[in-house]
Amino acid sequence: MLLSHGGGGRRTEELIKRIFAKYLGNPILNQMDDAAVL
């Protein structure tokens, strides 16, 4: 993890898709929406 991952930009998106979504993803989270789904 690098400081650049905390900026919310391209690095953050790559980290989320490559690491977190791989293990924690589900159909709703995999949509990568930037808001809550109600």
Image (cartoon, grey):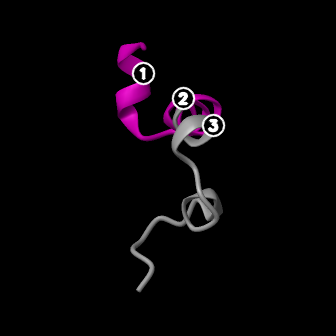
Report, in whole angstroms, how far the alpha carbon at label 1 lies from the one at label 2: 6 Å
How far apart are the alpha carbons under marks 2 and 3? Answer: 16 Å
Is the C-beta separation of discs 1 and 2 under 8 Å? Answer: yes
Q: Are marks 2 and 3 in contact (CB under 8 Å)?
A: no
Decide: is 15 above or below 36: above
Q: Which residues are magenta?
A: 1-19
Which numbered disc, 2 or 3, marks the residue that appears first in the sequence? Answer: 2
- Please provide percent x and percent y for residue 9: 50, 39
Q: Residue at x 42, y 21 (%)?
A: 4
Q: Which mark is residue 4?
A: 1
Question: Residue 37, which numbered label?
Answer: none
Tell me the distance, in whole angstroms, between the alpha carbons under discs 3 and 1. Answer: 21 Å
Total label count? Answer: 3
Indicate which disc, 3 or 1, sits on the residue closer to the N terminus.
1
For the N terminus, the quadrant is: top left
* Depicted 22 relative to depicted 26: above or below: above
Q: Position of residue 15 (x, y in %)?
A: 54, 30
Residue situated in front as seen by the camera: 8 or 31 = 31
Residue at image point 54% right, 29% down: 11
Horizontal and vertical percent position of residue 13: 56, 40
**For the view shown, which residue lies furthest in the bottom direction?**
38
Q: Which disc is residue 11 wearing?
A: 2
Mark 3 nearby-residue class (10 Å; few <14, some 14–19, many ≥20): few
Callout 1 secondary element: helix
Query: Seen from this angle, which residue lies furthest top?
Result: 2
Q: Which dot, 3 or 1, sits closer to the camera?
A: 3
**Type of secondary structure dominating the magenta stretch:** helix
What's the residue type where badge 1 is placed? Ser
Residue topped by disc 3? 22
Along the line of sight, the residue nearer the viewer: 20 or 6: 20
